[in-house]
Each structure stands twice: as C-alpha cells, then as structure tokens.
Amino acid sequence: MARDDIRIFDTTLRDGEQAPGCSMTLREKLRVARALAELNVDIIEAGFPAASPGDFESVKAIADEDLGPVICGLARCNPEDIEKVHAAVRGASRHRIHVFVATSAIHREHKLRMAKEEIIKSAVGAISMARELCDDVEFSPEDASRTELAYLAEVVTAAIEAGATTVNIPDTVGYTVPAEFDELFRYLKAHVPGIDDITLSVHCHDDLGMAVANSLAAVRAGARQVECTINGIGERAGNCSLEEIVMALATRAEFFGAGTGIETTRLYPTSRLVSSITGMHVPRNKAIVGENAFAHEAGIHQHGMLQHASTYEIMRPEDVGLSRSNLVLGKHSGRHAFRDRVRELGFELDDFETNSAFLEFKKLADKKKDVYDSDIEAIIMSSDATSPGPWVLKSWRVETGTDRDATAHVELIGENQQTTTATADGDGPVAASFLALEQATGIDLELKKFEVHSVSVGEDAQGEVTVTVSHDGSDYRGHGTSVDIVEAGSRAYLEVINRVLRRRDRGARRPTPPTRATI
Ligand code: KIV
Ligand code: ZN
C-alpha cells in the first residue's frame, strides 16, 4: 500500500514568490493555490502577511477560499507579525502560524545583534503568543545548519516546551551536505526531549545544488515534513523542488520507507502553470518536468525503449501528468474534442474560460496545421479569461524592410469598448510595436529583458515571449504567445501595461503605500 507519511509543505507562494522576478498578482496567487490544492499538498504557505498590505490581502484571499490544505502564514517573532498572520489565515478551517528567528552565530552577531538567551526568549514568547491564537504553530530557527549543535538543541527544546507543534530545520543558505545534515537531524533526535511528539520538518535551499539531496537525507534521519516549491523557485538558487522530492520518494519508496499523498499526475500541469505565471522557464533537462525529462534521442536508448520502457525509464511520464500520446488537434476539431483534451491535460475551466480558450484555439488552428498539447497549455495560461484587461489587442500591423525603420500600427479595445489606435516608428518591428502600445495607453515602460521560447514543434510552432520591464522603480513580467513573435511580444508588453494600470487602480483605492519587509 502506498504510504503518505511525509507531509508536503509548499512554499511557492512565500519563499518562491520572494525570489527576484517571481512576484505574482493576487489573482495569480489564487490560481497557484488552487492548483496546489488539486496537487493535494498538505500545507500551503501562502505568504508573509506583514511584508506588505498586498501580501496580507493575498494570504487572506487564499485562506478564505478554504481549499482543503492547511493554510499557513510566516511571521517574525513579534506580536504585530503574529496577529497579522492570524487575521489573514483564520478564514481557512485548518490554519497555521509559522514563526522564525535566526539562531546561527553569524546572524546573531551581524543581523540581530542579540545574545543566545535573548533569541530563545524571543522565540518562546512568539510561540506562546501564537499558540494562544492557534493550535497549529510551526517554529523555524533560521540558518539552523550553521548554528552550533548544542545551542540548536537548546532552542528546539525551548520551542517544543513553548508549544510548537512543528519544528522546521532550515538550511537557509544552502550550505550543508547530505551526510552532515543527516548527523544534525540524528543529533536533535537524540538530544531534544519531546522531539518525537512534534513534526520535524526540513527546509533546504539549493545554493550548492543539494536541496533535494539534503531534504532526502533529513527524511532518512526522521524528518516528516518537507518544505519545497514548484520548479524549485525561491531565493537565489531556489528551494528544494517539490516535483523532484515527491518523485524521488515515490520512485524509491522501498529505500525510504516513506511516501507522500501528492497526486503526482498534477505535477506537470502545476509546473507549467507556475512557470507561465512567473516567467521562470523550466530548463529542458530539468528532472521530472523538463521537456527532455522523458525524451530518448540516442538510437540504442530508443531501441531499448521499444523492447521495454523500463530499460531506460525509471518513472512513467503519465505518472507525472505528461501524456505519451501528445494527441494533435487541428482546425476541424470541435468544442467537445477540445474540452476533453483540456481536461486530460489537467485543467478545470469554467464555461466562460472554456469558450474563450476555444476561440483562441480556433484562431490558432487557422494559422497552424497541428495544435499540440503545449499549444493548448499556452493558450490556457495566457488566455484573456485569466489575464484581464483593461486593454485588449484588437489588431496590429508592421511595415519594415532593410532600408527603413519599422512603423507599427496598433488598435486596442479599452474598458468601455472604445477603440484606440497609435502609430510609432522604431529600430525594428518589436521596438516600434512597443512604442505604439505605450502611446496608445499612455504608459511608459523600460524594457529590460526580451525572451523567446518555442512552445511546440515544427516550422509553424508558437513562440512564447516573456518581457521583463521596469516602471516607477518596480519590475514586472508579462507573457504572450502567438505564431508571430511581434504579436507574442506585443501581447506580453500589453499584459504588463494592464498590470501597471490595475496596480495603479488598486493604489488609488487604498491609501497606504505598500512597503515590503524583507526576511
Ligand atoms: O530559508 C529559510 O530559513 C526560511 C525560513 C523563514 C524558514 O525561509
Ligand atoms: Zn527559505
């Protein structure tokens, strides 16, 4: 029988979202939270409510949907942070307050300027206060892997006595190695009274590429909760990747004698959703969810695969939600076939979303002979239903050539169905189109990065453009897909313009300027 004794604590929306360029809107965070619930994660760390009013609102919106998993929020060891977490998460029937304070000598001396005893006092005070508000309290001694072992055991003992129900051991800077982390966990198991009565957790960063290996070492040594993120996104080199740890435990279940309750067939769609929302592309060779993860190129491997898949495959692509068939749809495919395919790919769309995605599919099928699964995914991820206006690109045209600048004309439809047009010249078709969009909407942006990525195969493959732009000191990302790169770029640019306008609109309604606290 499959085991599910390892709790999966997903922190994509907190540690992942904190990574440069990964910030998400409230609507995007809700989509990710719903996908995480379908993936059947045990705990969703929805954010850090004290970081900004926007973070508070999004944690509260996620908790209020009461999606099933425990909803958790992060707090420093102070009453304001703890109260904010409680106010944000209490809407979920199962909720958790996660408090943390750094314990290593480096952090004590250079960041906190606090003595060992003061840190213990602050942790105990925070945990006791959190326990008065909530039965489920997690404590993390930040930078635990660089903390003196005896002192760490003292802190963890005090945390358990104060009422922590989960104690998480973070390798905050990705410094440890598996054998050393194994020793650390075994040391705590041997020296902390009551440690078997709480859930011991692990939280690893990937600075030396060992986040998954270190987390597995902790599991072997007794950890029963793993903190991780979709696609391993997170501070610097990222966090332990959820899909990798889950599939390592599933594939090597006998070795680990432990498993998770994750619905593994949702791994691939969730990975695509997060990469599309954050613009953090999954490398082709990434384990489990990379494009090449199940591709066999070498003749000898292909021959072996034809004889028996297990010759070169330790997991079945279907188990992670990748369909082997990659069935192709075309312009004669009807609404039913499209809807069925969307479901098989793991998306649940309402009627409005299905209709809008189907219209996009029809437009694409007119331009492109074969429509692949990845095209359908791209349509769904970037559909107007999921990235609302105010501006929608109605039409565009570019004139260009070797001996002249490019001239772009764009036609946009605005909130009250009014049409706006603009014409601009630029060094190339993309630059001219971006300028025309800025003129039409009155928003000036500074383009920092323009990335193109092919979402399917063949000469008529769709391109996905991700733009990173800056406006008023903030960075934004936008995505657009089309068989035409200029159009994909324009859609991506317009998505950012819409984000800026929506944020401006929200700001006008909310007087408090958002300030983001950092950890
Ligand atoms: O990496 C870290 O130490 C953290 C803690 C707040 C758990 O993210
Ligand atoms: Zn972290």
Image (spheres, rainbow, N blue to C red):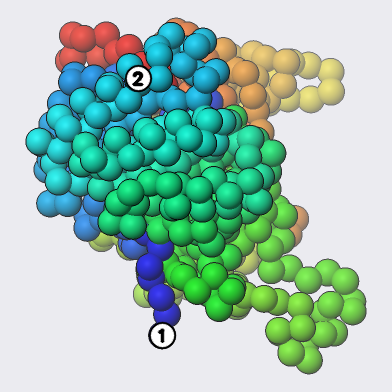
Name the residue: 67% across, 76% down. 314
Percent across and percent down for residue 440 are 44, 16
Q: Nearer the viewer, residue 278 or 144?
A: 144
Kindly identify which residue carries mark 2. 117
User: What SS does tag 1 mark?
Assistant: loop
Task: In the rendered view, tell whether residue 313 sits above or below residue 279.
Answer: below
Q: Report if residue 256 is visible in the image.
A: yes
x, y percent for residue 183: 58, 49
For this view, does 254 lie left or right of residue 401? left
Residue pictured at 78% horizontal, 16% vertical? 404
Image quadrant in which the C terminus is located: top left
The quadrant holding residue 339 is: bottom left
Per the model, the C-alpha gap separating discs 2 and 1 is 47 Å
Kind of residue at disc 2: Glu
> Which one is in front, 305 or 350?
305
> Which amino acid, by three-letter code, is at mark 1?
Met
Instruction: Answer whether residue 432 is visible to the viewer in this image.
Output: no
Q: Residues within 10 Å of mark 1 (few under 14, many from 20)?
A: few
Looking at the image, tell me whether mark 2 or mark 1 is earlier in sequence order.
1
Looking at the image, residue 507 sits to the left or right of residue 290; the answer is: left
Quarter containing the N terminus: bottom left
The percent coordinates of residue 513 (x first, y second) are 27, 9
Mark 1 CB within 8 Å of ligand 1: no
Callout 2: SS: helix
Quarter of the image for residue 502 reads: top left
List the residue tagged with mark 1: 1
Numbered tag placed on residue 38 in the rendering: none
Depicted 284 relative to depicted 510: above or below: below
| Residue at x 17% of width, y 51% of height | 94
